Amino acid sequence: MQLLKISLITVTRNAQKTLGRCIESVIAQNYSNIEYIIIDGASTDDTLQIISQHKQHIDFFVSEPDAGIYDAMNKGIRMATGNIVGILNSDDFFAYKETLSDIATAFANDNIDVLYGNLNYINPNGSIVRKWRSGAYKPGMFNRGWMPPHPTFYCKRVLFEKWGDYKLQYGTAADYELMLRFIHLNKANTYYLNKTMITMEIGGQSNKNYFNRIKAWGNDYMAMRKNGVKFPLLSVVFKPISKIFQYI
């Protein structure tokens, strides 16, 4: 049986501290049919040197100014030719070497459109500070504030052709809006891989300060209204509460 091709996209800008770790976790995967794409936002530190050191493992690479992380993701998606597409950001890395093998097996053996799993957060010293355990999806869970961790989100490439890519107008909620659109609105068949797929270093943009948090709530609300969440204002409140029960 021919192996499914997985297009893996890393977006980066001035990520010299973490990019090498990210790339090395890709190289360490025991799955062979990987198309690795790196989209760089015109870095000015040593990011490009790190990429050059690993160029034999990178299929496509571009470095140019962009309109932010989700614009860069969209560039990568347009370049992708794989059956399956996933995002591995520069401060993330695979938790174990069989991650992509498990993803490919799930897509090959089940009638699924979307896969997600679990995630660990670490601090810059490498210590685990929080564990996100997603749980199996059931229809309607987005109405109660549930969401899967986006770094573990993999889907068939054709879904982007059918339902669109990341919408920049939703700001830091663009990944949440896309998952809402694919899973909640369009009812994609989902698969929960009950393993810790990704390790992620803390420090997201949406939580840096109170102003950013308020802005993120507004973006969440717009995403919910657009994609048919029943009570979007109430769900904005439920969303952080729901995460408490997913964290251990």
Image: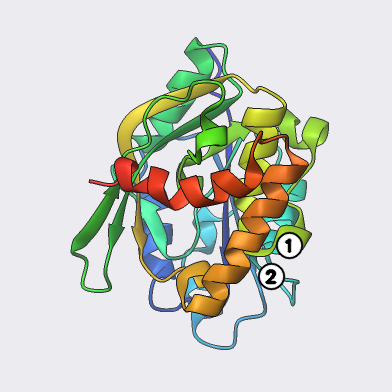
Give the residue at x 49% y 77%. 210
- In the displayed structure, 34 sits above or below 176; it is above
Q: Nearer the viewer, residue 5 or 170?
A: 170
Q: Are marks 1 and 2 in contact (CB under 8 Å)?
A: yes
In percent of width and height, residue 71 lies at: 73, 62
Secondary element under disc 2, as helix, strand or loop, is loop
Question: Mark 1 highlights which residue?
Answer: 71
Amino acid carrying mark 2 in the image: Gly
Bin the neighbour count of mark 1 within 10 Å (Cα to Cα): few under 14, some 14-19, many 20 and up.
Answer: some
Amino acid carrying mark 1 in the image: Asp
Distance from the alpha carbon under mark 1 to that under mark 2: 5 Å
Q: As drawn, which residue projects farthest toward the left?
A: 127
Give the residue at x 22% y 66%. 126
In percent of width and height, residue 199 lies at: 33, 53
In percent of width and height, residue 135 lies at: 36, 30
Give the residue at x 66% y 74%. 41
Question: Mark 2 highlights which residue?
Answer: 68
Q: As drawn, which residue projects farthest toward the bottom?
A: 44
- In the displayed structure, 152 sits above or below 187; it is below
Q: Residue 50, labelled with which disc? A: none
Q: Is residue 246 visible?
A: yes
